[in-house]
Image (spheres, grey):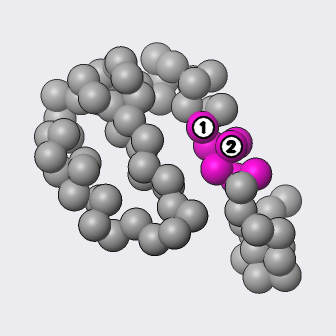
Amino acid sequence: MVCGSKDDVIIDPHALKGWLNWLKEGDVFWECPQGPHFFHYFYPQQVGRKIIKFWQALPLNESNITSGLVA
């Protein structure tokens, strides 16, 4: 999962979108529609919902459990 903000003044939007070339099936790219570099601080509920949705979409298998991805 790659997250960023459309209004980020530190991470260039083109640099953030550079991650798109590396994503695999099931990976998620999400841009918070508002917020500065610390969008996760200013919009914790919105970010949290996206992270939980991503986690819930992960397949439940033995390797996820033993690696600590699933508590």
What amino acid type is highlighted by mark number 1? Lys
Residue tagged 2: 53
Q: Is residue 66 visible?
A: no
In the image as oriented, which residue stretches furthest toward the front? 25
Q: Quadrant of residue 31?
A: top left
Query: Is residue 43 shown in magenta?
Result: no
Badge 1 crowding class, 10 Å Cα cut-off, few under 14, some 14 to 19, many 20 or more, is: some
Q: Rounded to the nearest whole Å, what is the CA distance between mark 2 and mark 1?
A: 5 Å
Residue 40 screen position, x and y as percent: 47, 29
Q: Which residue is mark 1?
A: 50
Q: Which residues are magenta?
A: 50-56
Residue at 76%, 51% in the rendered image: 56
Q: Quadrant of the C terminus?
A: bottom right
Residue 58 makes an appearance in the image: yes
Amino acid type for the residue under numbered disc 2: Lys
Secondary structure type for disc 1: helix
